[in-house]
Image (tube, rainbow, N blue to C red):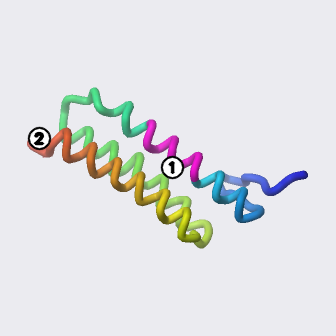
Amino acid sequence: MVNGYIGLGVPIGTDAFIHHFVKDKCQAIMDDVDKLVNIQDGFIHYQLLRFCQATRLQYINGQFTLTNQNVLQQQHVDHKIANALLKKGTLDI
């Protein structure tokens, strides 16, 4: 039984299908944030987090209305990005 499908990066289907899709996307973003820790230049690190990682959630948010569970998942991503910025610092910005 098909619960939904993904077209152009947008999930269409049951609530459970959308929850799972958003959960997977949030985890993928947090994994990618961890991969950027080795970048020494604070400005480059900031730009990659702001324009490459944070915008991935903005795209998802523009495509469908989020339920509370998805909003909470995305708060974890925001927290991860903020912590990455605080750990690296902004001395080079």
SS assignment for the magenta stretch, majority: helix
Q: Residue at horizontal 19%, vertical 33%?
A: 41
Name the quadrant containing residue 15.
bottom right
Q: Is residue 28 magenta?
A: yes
Q: At x 41% / y 47%, what residue is drawn?
A: 53
Magenta stretch contains residue 10:
no
Residue type highlighted by circle 2: Asp
The foreground one among 19 and 36 is 19
Q: In the displayed structure, does residue 13 sit left or right of residue 80?
A: right
- Element under disc 1: helix
User: From the viewer's perspective, is the residue at label 2 or at label 1 nearer?
Assistant: 1
Crowdedness near tag 2: few (<14), some (14–19) or many (≥20) residues, C-alpha within 10 Å: few
- Residue under label 1, please give it: 26
Residue 29 lies, in percent from the top left, at 47, 44
Mark 2, residue position: 92
Name of the residue lying farthest toward the left: 91
Q: Amino acid at mark 1?
A: Cys
Residue in the picture at 11% in, 40% down: 92
- What secondary structure is found at the residue carrying circle 2? loop
Label tally: 2
Q: Residue 32: which quarter of the image?
A: top left
Closer-to-camera residue (43/35): 35
x and y percentages locating residue 68 in the rendered image: 54, 70
Q: Quadrant of residue 60?
A: bottom right
User: Which stretch is magenta?
Assistant: 23-31
For disc 1, the neighbor class at 10 Å (few under 14, some 14 to 19, many from 20) is many
Mark closer to the chain start, 2 or 1: 1
**Residue that protrudes farthest toward the right in the picture:** 1
Question: Residue 58's mark?
Answer: none
